[in-house]
Amino acid sequence: MRNAILITGFNGEIGRQTLHSLCKRKIHIIALDINNSDIKYDNVIFIKDSILNQDVIKSIFDDFNIIEIYHFAALLSQSANDNPELANKVNEEGSKLIINTAMHYAQTNESFIKIFFPSSIAVYGPRKLKNAKELDIMKPQTIYGCNKLAIEQYGTNKHEESLILGFGIDFRCLRLPGIISPYTIPYGGTTDFAPQMLHAACNNESFICKVDPMTILPFLGIENAVKAIRDIMSVENIDSNLRAFNVQEMILSPKEIIKQLKKEFPNFIVDYKVDSKFQSIADTWPENLNCEQASEKWNFINKQNNDVTFKEYLIPEIKKHYGKH
């Protein structure tokens, strides 16, 4: 049976870039998403279906020896709030189906399957923390945050069970902050204003921001987000009971983002129409993530420099993306 990697939700912001990175490896990749793919890779089999389809999930494990899973399929924060019933099905039931199926096949084959799960700063709450550590108070105020925390705990429990059995799943998780990508424009998330601003500025478009200009949140550029995912998955063994780690590289407010963008796009115009639906969520998420555990356990490097990230990566890449060298 051929070894393979399974990636779900590959059409999403992080999934797409992670798939691109994984394709450099000489291994079969099974890419599952509810939408058709507009990209092609020689070593990728694309499947259009839902992670809730048990028959499809089972057939993937029947046909391939899955050795790693990157599970990105999910409803994001605002979309989850708008449709909590679907969010519970996709974000929790779907995730548990992936974990349980991997657990079953790993036990059958007496092996371990690595699973990467992208959690979120949405697990924190109910108040805004200045420097959130992994074990700080976690009382999420959104269905999305509750979903993410539930799977963090479920995956960790299954990981511990696997260690006792001697085979099963090796669960690895990052608590991701807002992601800024020069390649895609995301929708449905609370922190999406940041990448939306970047794309609007490059295209000489005005922007209406739905959160207060002084709202501070942690962020990570897509390039370093994918690097962190690859790094945590490449470590042979993470010697820690902690399975969900904080990562970030920038601390930004809308005001700071505008300042950075105006250096390159001086005519960029932003108006504020604060939406309580967005603001109330942002006010429960941390300003800063303490990344000491990630640095200690698997050598994450927190390159925290707003000027460098915008000047040397985000601005050049967004201009290249739109052909505006």
Image (cartoon, rainbow, N blue to C red):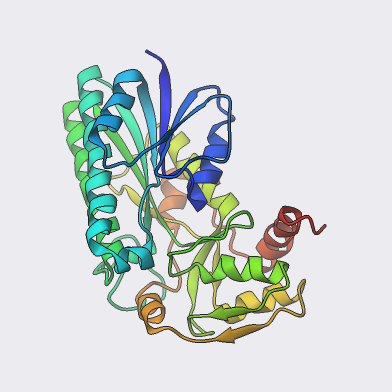
Q: Residue at x 46, y 86 (%)?
A: 274
Instruction: Please state which of residues 55 and 160 is positioned toward the viewer in this rendering.
Output: 55
Q: Is 198 situated left or right of 81 in this image?
A: right
Q: Is 224 situated left or right of 312 in this image?
A: left
* Count of number-bearing discs: 0
Location of the C terminus by quadrant is: bottom right
Instruction: Please state which of residues 291 and 54 is positioned toward the viewer in this rendering.
Output: 54
Q: Please state the horizontal and vertical placement of residue 206, each as a whole percent of the image.
A: 66, 78
Q: Is 157 situated left or right of 211 in this image?
A: left
Quadrant in the picture for residue 9: top left
Q: Residue at x 29, y 56 (%)?
A: 148
Q: Please state the horizontal and vertical placement of residue 139, each as a whole percent of the image.
A: 24, 69
Quadrant in the picture for residue 83: bottom left
Q: Is residue 193 visible?
A: yes
Instruction: Please state which of residues 243 and 88 is positioned toward the viewer in this rendering.
Output: 88
Q: Residue at x 48, y 50 (%)?
A: 12
Quadrant in the picture for residue 275: bottom left
Residue occupying the far right of the picture: 325
Where 160 sits versus 119, above or below?
A: above
Q: Is 83 situated left or right of 308 in this image?
A: left
Residue occupying the far top of the picture: 1
Location of the N terminus by quadrant is: top left
Where 263 sits versus 273, above or below?
A: above
Q: Is residue 155 visible?
A: no
Where 34 sits versus 301, above or below?
A: above
Q: Please state the horizontal and vertical placement of residue 96, each as a whole percent of the image.
A: 23, 43
